[in-house]
């Protein structure tokens, strides 16, 4: 098989009549004044949630205290390790975890964040997955690892930043680059 047809509901995720970012953040209990990186995927190491948490930790240690993340995974049972890591990195109050969101909640999440990250770091999970397509349909810039099919999501850097796989320092710099853009440039 060489072609996979996506199942992303572009019309749903690109709906411009959705509530405002402030309203979406309020509905999810997210801070209104924090720059947030979004990520959706199973709570497995191959998805790179730990890389995002560590990158947020690095940025906060460098004084960028208004940068955090909203991460949605699939199981409350496997969430604890990510919460522990956020504590160890000193960013437990800047990482917001969610579990098993339905489509409407995912739309709220995508509309609440400022950049979407796909940090899949193994051959098993490095395709153009549904969460990435949904985030892109929502108009988010993306930061993706240069792994598998992911580079195809960022042709010539037009809609995001390509990061060397497993390079947390470069990931933190990519997040900082998007953070320093105006909202118009991010769009």
Image: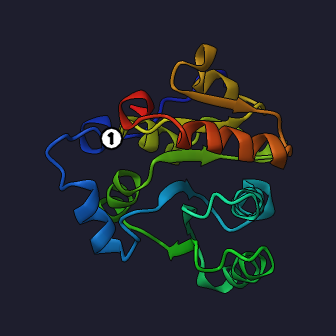
When the figure is inspected, residue 172 is found, relative to residue 148, above or below; the finding is below
When the figure is inspected, residue 179 is found, relative to residue 48, above or below; the finding is above
When the figure is inspected, residue 58 is found, relative to residue 128, above or below; the finding is below
Judge from the rendering whether residue 24 lies leftward or rightward of residue 99; answer left or right: left
Identify the residue at image location x=86%, y=45%.
166
Judge from the rendering whether residue 77 lies leftward or rightward of residue 54; answer left or right: left
Front residue of 16/150: it is 16
Judge from the rendering whether residue 159 lies leftward or rightward of residue 30; answer left or right: right
Q: Quadrant of residue 146?
A: top right
Identify the residue at image location x=45%, y=43%.
135
**Image coords of residue 178 (percent x, y):** 56, 38
Give the number of callouts: 1
Front residue of 168/139: it is 168
**Image coords of residue 41 (percent x, y):** 60, 59
Please indicate, yes or no, whether residue 122 appears anywhere in the rendered image: no
Q: Quadrant of residue 143?
A: top right
**Image coords of residue 3 (percent x, y):** 59, 22
**Is the N terminus in the top left, top right, bottom left or bottom right quadrant?**
top right
Identify the residue at image location x=29%, y=72%.
26
Q: Residues within 10 Å of mark 1 (few under 14, many from 20)?
A: few
Question: Pointer 1: what residue?
Answer: 9
Q: Residue furthest top?
A: 156
**Is the C terminus in the top left, top right, bottom left or bottom right quadrant?**
top left
* SS state under label 1: loop
Front residue of 7/75: it is 75
**Image coords of residue 169 (percent x, y):** 83, 46
């Amino acid at each position: 098989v060489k072609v996979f047809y996506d199942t992303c509901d572009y019309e749903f995720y690109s709906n411009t009549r959705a509530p405002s970012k402030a309203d979406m953040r309020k509905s999810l209990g997210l801070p209104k004044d924090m720059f947030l990186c979004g990520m959706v995927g199973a709570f497995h190491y191959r998805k790179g949630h730990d890389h995002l948490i560590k990158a947020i930790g690095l940025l906060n240690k460098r004084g960028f205290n208004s940068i955090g993340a909203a991460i949605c995974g699939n199981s409350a049972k496997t969430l604890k390790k990510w919460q522990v890591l956020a504590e160890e990195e000193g960013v437990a109050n800047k990482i917001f975890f969610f579990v098993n969101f339905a489509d409407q909640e995912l739309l709220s999440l995508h509309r609440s964040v400022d950049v979407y990250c796909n940090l899949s770091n193994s051959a098993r999970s490095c395709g153009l997955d549904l969460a990435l397509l949904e985030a892109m349909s929502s108009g988010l810039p993306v930061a993706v690892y240069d792994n598998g099919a992911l580079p195809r999501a960022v042709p010539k850097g037009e809609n995001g930043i390509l990061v060397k796989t497993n390079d947390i320092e470069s990931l933190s710099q990519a997040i900082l680059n998007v953070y320093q853009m105006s909202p118009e440039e991010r769009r």
